[in-house]
Amino acid sequence: MYKDIHQWYLAVDEAVSTTEKYEDLILKFYKTLRINPDKHLVQPFLTKFYKKETFGSRFVSIAISKLGLSFGIAIVGFVAIWLFRVLGSGMEFIDAAKDTSHLVLAGILAGVIFILTEILSVVLTFVSYKSIIKKFEAYEVQLHDIMVSLPSRYRNSERMSFIKQAYYSVKGIAPEAAFNVADQFDDARKRPFQGVFFDLPYKNNFVEAEEFKQGQQEVEKTEEEKQFENPNLPADIKSKTFSGSKDAKKDLDSMIGLESVKEQIEKLENRIKFYGNNNNGNHMQFLGSAGTGKTTVARIVTKILFDLGYIKKNQYVEISGDYLKAGNSARVDAIIEYSMGGVLFIDEAYLLYDKNGYSAEATGILLKAMEDHRSDFVVILAGYEEQMTRLIASNEGFSSRIKHTIYFPDYTEQEMLEIFKYFISNYSGKSYKISDNAIPLLLETFTLEKQVKSFGNARTVRNAVDTIMDNYADRSINAHTDTRIIEIEDVQKYQDSRKVFLQHEVRNSSASSNIDESIISLGELKTKVRNGSEDPDEDFSRLVQFSSFASEIEALKKQKEFYNDTKTQKILIADHYGSGVPFLVQVITGYLYKLGYISDNKYLQIDAEFLKGSYVGHTAKRANAIINYATGGVLFIRNISKLSDDTFSTEVKNAILEALDNDLTIIISDTELNPELFTVYYEVPKPDTATLMQVFINAADEDNFTVQDSAQTKLLSMLNNKTIKDVLNIYEKAKKKHIDNFTEETKYIITEDDIEKPMIKLNIKH
């Protein structure tokens, strides 16, 4: 890269004029393609951005823009040709002018001139376009190294010019100080460009140069002195200050699992790159359980924000919600001021608000700073999804300021195993492995761990590693061996030691989940969420018992096509026991999502009894919480008719009727409600034996089985007065019996012997 700071500053100096040419070329590029550049200049430009706008895609508009010039030249040509023909005819001018043959010939030749001029104009524009592309590519090669050495917020000619001037004004000035000079003159920018080469990762090798380190220390020392001049700043704040990642991409890729988090981070980075340096705030929230890597990702995000120029320091301050609110307002102000220029990462942010104490003062100061200084620092709020949802709902200022949300799912057992292997690969300076025989038992133990409220993801794995390694050490000392292989007995001792504790915690977890006013637990709701069909056409084709619902689906499609209307649907399904309505709801949800009626391909399946509160008036609050949770998807309610006749049940029925007036898609399975309250009413027909037989065959087909003819004959004799649920139970029993007794010849064939007739109960009088 660059040998020393002086060489780097000279490179910045030399690159200013080339960058100006690059920026001027951008304007020329858009002008050539007949595009208004104003809407593009507010965003930074990525390398190869010009590949997205091709000459071919703009050909028609370019050709149309040349029509005026071509037409003008054709008119001049027409007049010139006509005069030439008239004057050169040897006839009197008036007589020659009356000769229409001259007009026809001049018109034909003028048309040829028009076509040739239009073609020539477009060709010349294409040549100019290719020349611009070639220059872009050449400039990008020339400017690559210097742009990489600059944080992305300084990658435009104006800021580079200020950096250069700072160096020539104060010889030996540290780059960070020069960057600050450029920041001070940001408002004076005359050129409209936010930045170029915005997607190149920031890398500056010369920062290790002794001269730079000395200058950096001087700047940092001055800033530190200023920061700690504030007597209200907590004495331990320095111990809570950390550097961001050195290589964000490498660190993110090295994290085990968390694929959805990695995708979300990539989308976040792309959004920031696309919308550029027009900083309207990038505050965010991380939602997830303990031990899912939120702190590590905060470190990575800090580096990304720094590289993209949204913060000036690759630094984050890590505190908790109760740490921020502990003390007076001056202390809160001091902590926030100290965090300026970097990231303020508030873990367990929900502690700002809990049932034991809500700090309106600390929250108010934080929200004001997030708004007034949104371009000066980034706040990341982190914590459990349930508690964080309550915090955000406690003050509408949070939702308006938080721009990005990243969800951290719990680790799967397999991911926990990979983390376990990673930890033992370098434990106390030695490398260990786990035997294949011990892995199933360890996975089983992780499954048990995930059932309790104290589950800590990676922290749980770390605790498991420490305990299992202690078991290994005891075994090794007693056996006088050191194989460095974790065996099944080491894991068995760990599982035995945990079972008593885990059973105790599972028994008491329901009591500890009585949160706040006991309206409802997020955990209660999440277990009742189902995914809608990904391929509703295919799945519906298998639901032969609901074939008559096809007309309702077509009506939904036509309504969307005719009105382009995505208003919420209220669907009442009058069913009977065992009809398999949940399968239909899954398909309906898939169609509603595909047609644009809902934004989330999910449905919340509950019994009406679930809406009941624990005291008079509680049901309305509980129902409201459930409706809010289901918004965006489908709320599926069953068994209203099974409610008992009491006060709570009356509240539930009233809540359901009120819900029908809300902007929410609802499907209700019931036979007592008034169909006129719904946009769709469907009465499930009772299936005949042919339909029931097809249900059995379809279920077998999904498992890659065929059904022997003799088995079908036997099955037909059993289907009178049966329900869909009965048939599916018969199939499951047949499949189990087949698998227990299969032969290679009939491995995937359900035979007559697999079908068991139900036992007939006889009432014998003694």
Image: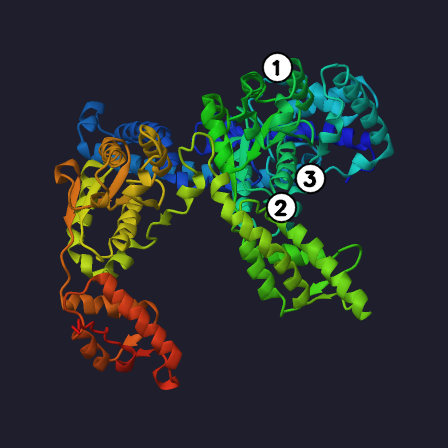
Q: Within 10 angstroms of label 3, few (less than 14), some, or many (20 or more) residues?
A: many
Q: Which image quarter: residue 647?
A: top left
Q: Where is residue 174? Give x, y as percent.
A: 79, 25
Which numbered circle lies on residue 245?
3
Secondary element type, mark 1: helix
Q: Which of 142 and 657 is in front in this view?
A: 657
Q: Quadrant of the C terminus?
A: bottom left
Secondary element type, mark 3: loop
How far apart, in angstroms, are the residues tagged by discs 3 and 2?
A: 9 Å
Which numbered circle lies on residue 712?
none
Q: Where is residue 657? Give x, y as percent.
A: 22, 33
Which residue is labeled 2 in the image? 252
Residue type at mark 3 is Ser
Outermost residue to the front: 766
Which numbered circle lies on residue 188?
1
The mark nearer the N terminus, 3 or 1, is 1
Q: Where is residue 209? Give x, y as percent.
A: 84, 35
- 378 left or right, relative to 698: right
Q: Nearer the viewer, residue 207 or 241?
A: 241
Q: Within 10 angstroms of label 1, few (less than 14), some, or many (20 or more) residues?
A: few
Q: Which of 757 and 585 is in front in this view?
A: 757
Q: Where is residue 586? Give x, y as percent.
A: 30, 51
